[in-house]
Image (cartoon, helix red, strand yellow):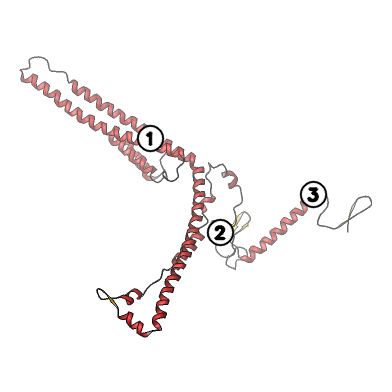
Amino acid sequence: MKLKKTRDSSYDLSNLQKMPAGPARLLKLLQILENDLSELPLDANSPASVIEAHSAFTGAVAFARQTAGQVETAEEAAGEASKADVAAAVKVAEAGGAGKFPEPTRSRKAAGAVDAALLGCEAAEKHVDAAHEHLVSAVQKAWPDWRRDDVARAEEAHGDLEAALAAALDAARVLVARRAAVLTLDQEMLSRDSALHAQVSGERRPGAVAWYAETHHDYRLFDVQVLGDLAKQVAASHEFAAGDWLPPEDPRHAELLATDVDAGRHWLRYMAARETGKTCSVCCRADASAPVPMLIDGKWWTVCETCFKANAAEQDKILAELQRRANVDQHGVDPNAAYSIGEDGSHHPA
């Protein structure tokens, strides 16, 4: 049984094994299995193989519930059959015991139906358990491709959201500007004509509504800043750290595991700050304000901008020297040095 390894699942399984075979145990098993699957995103862009396995599982659950109900029906029928056999025996007794008591055929047949229904419960247990295991296996097999597709869809949705917020922000600015223009126009016109101002101030609509005052009192324009802050927040959340990870079953897992991490990733910077602090790990004085951490002796450290640039320049010198030596080994001469060629073809420093 492929259940999540939790304290609750272990406790539930232990209790289940103590229960006798029958509808109660079958229904308890269904509850355990359905709870186990409740957090899986089975309805979120599921691959065809997962959809098929999920459909098979739900079918097995429906069959199991129907089977559990058959036991109750069979037990009720057995009770009625027992009453009928007893009534037949009573008639013989009332006749003075003449003849033979009838065989309890109804009870025996009904008891057989109960046994068959209980056997069906055991079969349904195995069937639904196998369907659950098949579904979990299907999810595990589809996991790499499924999450890769969802990561791509999330990136696309993020881009759509950014574009939508940018458009909404532009529309909000237009809205605010137009409404502000209306308010300003009203104020400017009334401030230039005291008689007109007195007239509109005194106008009342039915119900003693001060028309101008109430429609212009403490009027608040749409808060564009809130929408702008949301747009900035969405833009800053462009990096989805979990998208940089691959499960072991993914074909590119081993390759990516052995590849250097992109130093520009925000999650790497947070890791370096968490593990090595926010003070520069090189000079041990300045705040580590560099846009990227620095790899030193196989470990990522936070550094200040000055030390980061100095290290980058030093790394460039080392790489240039390594390249020079490789060229010397390949060509027998240093291509960066000046040489004169003798009559015999030999090289001499110029």
| SS at circle 2 | helix
| SS at circle 3 | helix
> Label 1 near label 2: C-beta < 8 Å?
no
Residue type for callout 3: Asp
Q: Residues within 10 Å of mark 2 (few under 14, many from 20)?
A: many
Q: Which residue is mark 1?
A: 129
Q: Would you place residue 188 above or below residue 295 in this image?
A: below
Residue 258 placed where, x, y %?
A: 60, 47
Q: Which residue is mark 2?
A: 269
Residue at position x 60%, y 45% in the image: 255
Q: Residues within 10 Å of mark 3 (few under 14, many from 20)?
A: few
Q: Residues within 10 Å of mark 1 (few under 14, many from 20)?
A: many
Q: Residues under labels 3 and 2: Cα distance?
A: 39 Å
Q: Which label is found at residue 98?
A: none
Residue type for callout 2: Arg
Dot placed on the residue nearer the N-terminal end, 1 or 3: 1
Residue at position x 40%, y 79% in the image: 187
Q: Residues under labels 2 and 1: Cα distance?
A: 45 Å
- Identify which residue, 300 or 161, lies in the foreground: 161
Q: Which label is found at residue 329?
A: 3
Which quadrant would residue 182 be assigned to in this image?
A: bottom left
